[in-house]
Image (cartoon, rainbow, N blue to C red):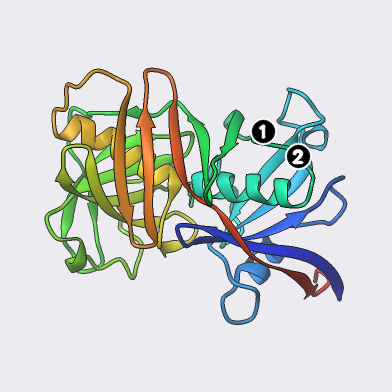
Amino acid sequence: MRRWSFSKGHGTENDFVVLLDRDDTMGVGPAEVRYLCDRHAGLGGDGLLRAVRARHVPEWDGDGSLWFMDYRNADGSVAQMCGNGLRVFARFLLDHDLASGPTLQIATRTGLQEATVLPDTRIRVSMGPVRVDAPATPVTVRTGDGTEHVVLPADVGNPHGVAFVDDLGALDLHTAPQVPADVFPEGVNVEFVRVLGPRHIALRVHERGVGETRSCGTGTVAAAAAARVHTGDTTPLPVTYRVEVPGGEVEVELAEDQAHLTGPAVLIAHGQVLVPEEG
Ligand SMILES: N[C@@H](CCC[C@H](N)C(=O)O)C(=O)O
């Protein structure tokens, strides 16, 4: 057995196991991620955040002394970005004196992002650009009860499909929504959004590689951008959306070239975990 130090944290109840693997020596593969994120046999988490010096990440070509956020879904798959994870990652770096605030730079698979600590439990992070497509032919997904929903494809570095519904409570998200593979060849995160008022929305989400989660940061950004298109909101950018999720509430700022996400980020435990040797 290997004995690893870990932290556990969450942002609006999207929860993560966090590991410090400074020099990329731990050997954190898909099996280790699945083990640690398992809610019965492991620590439990929607995903895992590994803090590694960027110089050890072949796809990173910027400043190697930065911390790289290596995000994995609970099923062991790699995703390009995680908005709630980015805030929790920033909190982890600060609490462990691995970086100093109030503003810090973090290397990610979607490039360099910035996190700013606010006086309460919240952290504001840059999320890069968000793109919403209005396809010529409607894209539909089918939920567990067989209901079909038209989605707007959106890209926040990772893929999203955003559907607008009247009743969030009626959705069956026990199984992954069936999606057209030609539109989403790498799978997709699907957000179901109810418009509550001007620039005020609520959502439920089914995450690729995880299942239904209590929140998804990139999903809130995708949903806000899609809601702007869906409602025909012509208010000039920048605009701010209030987004309610099952695990709390976040704020999404949309600007021409960059979105920002603000919400809580807390660490709830530090400890040691025994991890079986591979094989
Ligand atoms: N929970 C995350 C998104 C995590 C990645 C996603 N499941 C994917 O596979 O793209 C967030 O807060 O953004």
Q: Nearer the viewer, residue 6 or 40?
A: 6
The answer to whether mark 1 is within 8 Å of ligand 1 is no
In the picture, measured across the screen, residue 86 lies left or right of residue 186, that is right
Instruction: Identify the image quadrant of the C terminus.
Output: bottom right
Q: Marks 1 and 2: in contact by CB < 8 Å?
A: yes
Displayed quadrant of residue 173 = bottom left
Q: Residue 193: percent from the left, percent from the top?
A: 23, 50
Residue beneath disc 1 = 104
Q: Residue 137: percent from the left, percent from the top?
A: 17, 33
Residue beneath disc 2 = 99
Q: Amino acid at mark 2?
A: Ala
In the picture, measured across the screen, residue 202 lies left or right of residue 30, that is left
Question: Residue at (20%, 69%) from the top-left corner?
Answer: 145
**Residue found at the very far front of the displayed protein:** 119
Q: Nearer the viewer, residue 126 or 27?
A: 126
In the picture, measured across the screen, residue 32 lies left or right of residue 45, that is right
Instruction: Identify the image quadrant of the N terminus.
Output: bottom right
Task: Kindly identify which numbered label has been placed on residue 230.
Answer: none
Q: How packed is label 2: few (under 14 Cα within 10 Å), some, or many (20 or more)? A: some
Q: Amino acid at mark 1?
A: Leu
Question: Residue at (82%, 66%) from the top-left corner?
Answer: 4
Give the mark nearer the N terminus: 2 vs 1.
2
Q: Residue 234: percent from the left, percent from the top?
A: 17, 21
25 versus 69 height, above or below: below
The answer to whether residue 179 of the structure is visible from this angle is no
Q: How many marks?
A: 2
122 versus 61 height, above or below: below
Q: CA distance from mark 2 to mark 1?
A: 7 Å
Question: Residue at (16%, 27%) from the top-left corner?
Answer: 233
Displayed quadrant of residue 134 = top left
67 versus 145 height, above or below: above
